[in-house]
Amino acid sequence: MTAAPLISVLLPVYNAERYVAAAMQSILRQDHGRIELIAIDDGSTDRSLEILERCRQDDSRVSIISRENRGLVASLNEGLAIARGDLVARMDADDFAYPWRLSRQAALFAARPELGFCGALVDTLLHGRIARGRLDPVFRLGLPVLSKFFTIFMHPTVVYNRKVIGEADLHYDGFYRHAEDFDLFRRLAERYPAALIPESLLVYRIHPGSVTSLHNKEMRRTHLRIVGENLESEGLTEDGATLRAIGETVTFDTVARAAAFIRALEERIAALPGSTRPSFEAGALNLFYFLYQLVNDEERPALAHELLTLTGKWNAIRRREKYALSPGVWAPWLSQASMWAGKRADWVAYRFKSAPAASVLAPFRVEAA
């Protein structure tokens, strides 16, 4: 009988005292027996290191790196350098892994040893309520193509197979700070098979102190830079600078340029072979939605109206948003009021499709905090 693989779990930590104990316990209570948990304290100024030390005293599977603040990319690369497992898993200090997470992922690699890496769905914890994750039909298409347009896996769900991935390929690039996962996944997906497990394996916590919330603007700028690089390398554009421009500032000029970019991209994709065209079409639509969200977040309805009009994408958005943004040029105040009401409606819908976090997490002896 083949021994269960050792799984190294990389847990970067920065000022996460409120959540890190639950995150660590969720890994140490996994039903997969062979685990090493590598916690990298990135110069925390709160009680995070004290909590990590307490966990290490209680469980010999825990090791700690602690030093001055160097950022997430440096922390992850340090963890990769000392990890001993044939499988290396990511985990965030503010998330919670279900007890079967690692055994499910190990089983996938046992069944498909050619895989380079895998991800999974997540349940979302927002405002004290957890909503179940659902599989997006887009993942039935080709992951290598989709990886050129967006981050194909939620970063804390990923497990890498070091038996398959070349040592030189498994590293995070600091040039793409705050989108380092997008960059790594696009590079790996070009060379190694990848798979998504259609099951939620962890609870992904959304809160104001998360990296995603704190660095949203820089993350978006880097995301658009990566997409532009990918499309240039595919010969689908010679103008990646247009995406970088709207990432820097949203104006009527950058919106018009981005709309022209989307139209030209769609024309080039239409000429691709039928075997790959659907994946590229799905990726281009995802890029449009990314730009639409970027512009919408400016809360200037006239800009969103311009993007939708110049791209001809009015029918690609929800009917409620269409009605809200239609008067965006002549009555922006009306659009803003309608969009605010729409956000309230979304929150009500979230409450109906979610459950109190305390009740979901109670069987695992963890507080929602």
Image (cartoon, rainbow, N blue to C red):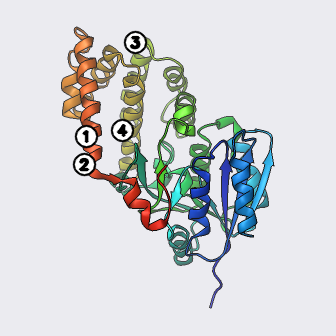
> Residue 252's mark?
3
Q: CA distance from mark 3 to mark 1?
A: 33 Å
Looking at the rendered structure, the kind of residue marked 1 is Val
Q: CA distance from mark 4 to mark 3?
A: 21 Å
Sequence-wise, the earlier of marks 2 and 4 is 4
Looking at the rendered structure, the kind of residue marked 4 is Leu
Do residues under tags 4 and 3 come within 8 Å of each other at their CB atoms? Answer: no
Q: Residue furthest right?
A: 67
Sequence-wise, the earlier of marks 3 and 1 is 3
Residue plotted at (41% across, 32% down) = 265
- Going by the image, does 336 lie left or right of 118? left
> Residue 182's mark?
none
Quickly name the residue at label 1: 348
Q: Residues within 10 Å of mark 2 (few under 14, many from 20)?
A: few
> In what element is the residue under mark 3?
helix
Which percent across, then down, holds residue 202? 48, 59
Sequence-wise, the earlier of marks 3 and 2 is 3
Pick the residue in front: 25 or 226.
25
Q: CA distance from mark 3 to mark 2?
A: 38 Å
Q: Residues within 10 Å of mark 1 (few under 14, many from 20)?
A: few
Whether residue 171 is visible: no
Which percent across, then down, holds residue 203? 46, 55
> Residue 285's mark?
4
Position above or below: 4 against 285: below
Q: Which is closer to the viewer, label 3 or label 1?
A: 1
> In what element is the residue under mark 4?
helix
> In what element is the residue under mark 2?
helix
Which percent across, then down, holds residue 204? 48, 51
Quickly name the residue at label 2: 352
- Going by the image, does 283 lie left or right of 185? left
Do residues under tags 4 and 1 come within 8 Å of each other at their CB atoms? Answer: no
Looking at the rendered structure, the kind of residue marked 2 is Phe
